[in-house]
Image (cartoon, grey):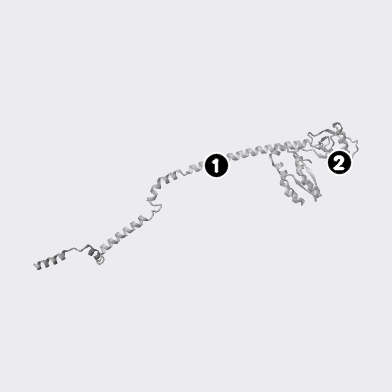
Amino acid sequence: MKKAQKGATQGSSQRTPMTRKENEINKFFNKPSPTQATDSDSNMADDDQEGVYSSRPQPPSSPTVLAPLAPDLSALIAALPQKADLTRLLDDIKEAQKRETAEIKRELAAMTTRIDGLEEMQDAENRSRGNNVRIRGIPEEIPQADLKPTLMALFNNLLEQDQDTAITIERLHRVAGNRTGRVRDVLCCLHNFTMKEQILRREAKIVQLKGDTIEIYQDLAHSPVYQRCLLREVTSLLKASNINYKWGFPFALLATQNGKTYSLKDPTDAPLFFNNLGLPCVDLQEWGRFVYTEDNATMGRPKAPDT
């Protein structure tokens, strides 16, 4: 009885399976076979790589990223201008430039024609006054009927001739308008151009007539007369520097120094003009505005300053 129980105990001990704890402990002591180790390592590597790639962001060029953008990119590429579109755009720009250039050329041609016409009109007006002289200072008390003998006596006095010397005067009259406190000028047309030049060449163009100061000038169109008024500061500087000057036709200021003559015809000539004469430059902005503004180009007549 006891033997049977003892044998049974031994047999049962041999067939009793390992407990779970023993199995877990044996894993640390049992060396796995090479095949199992290789399989295990490869599985771990695959698992690790899969985890790394799953957590790492995909590059922009990967198919998974480009897939949803493909329709948008196609639409953008299709919307880009093609070579034909660029060619048409370039042709349109060229045509627009040609039209604008042609319009500018037409405007310049019209302005050139207009300016040429105005210059011809001014030249004709000045030439029509070639024999005229303007006398300033003759009292208003002298009636129209007495103006002719008064002027003949004045001219003979300037030319140092006998008072009875005949001088042919074609016409004369006082100018229209009356400046406040100033007598009106008298315009006189002489028949002899040479005599007119002799009168204007006299140095004493300011004379006394019965106690009145009389001034004699060449009769010109409004534009050159007004420009002379604007250059009064320049002429005063020339007088103070003892530099001889005269007016040219149709308009120019001619100054002579050391046998050389320098001309001032346009505001752009001013720097060289003053430099050659050794004089300080005078501000001529007002003259420049008159010469280059549209008012003068359209024969506008600003009020001339008192002289």
Residue extending furthest toward the left = 1
Residue at 23% x, 63% y is: 21
Q: Residue at x 14, y 64 (%)?
A: 12
Q: Is residue 276 above or below residue 149?
A: below
Residue that carries the numbered disc 2 in the rendered image = 207
Q: Nearer the viewer, residue 44 or 291?
A: 44
Image x and y of residue 170, in percent: 83, 33
In the picture, the disc for residue 68 is none
Q: Residue at x 31, y 58 (%)?
A: 47
| Residue placed under numbered mark 1 in the picture | 93
Q: CA distance from mark 2 to mark 1?
A: 70 Å
Identity, as a three-letter code, of the amino acid under mark 2: Val
93 horizontally vs 233: left or right: left
Viewer-nearest of discs 2 and 1:
2
The type of residue carrying mark 1 is Ile
Task: Choose the circle earlier in sequence order: 2 or 1.
Answer: 1
Mark 2 near mark 1, Cβ–Cβ under 8 Å?
no
Please identify the quarter of the rendering in which residue 146 is found.
Answer: top right
Residue occupying the far top of the picture: 145
The answer to which image quadrant residue 50 occupies is: bottom left
Quarter of the picture containing the N terminus is: bottom left
**Left or right: where 2 falls relative to 136:** left
Location of residue 99 (image quadrant): top right
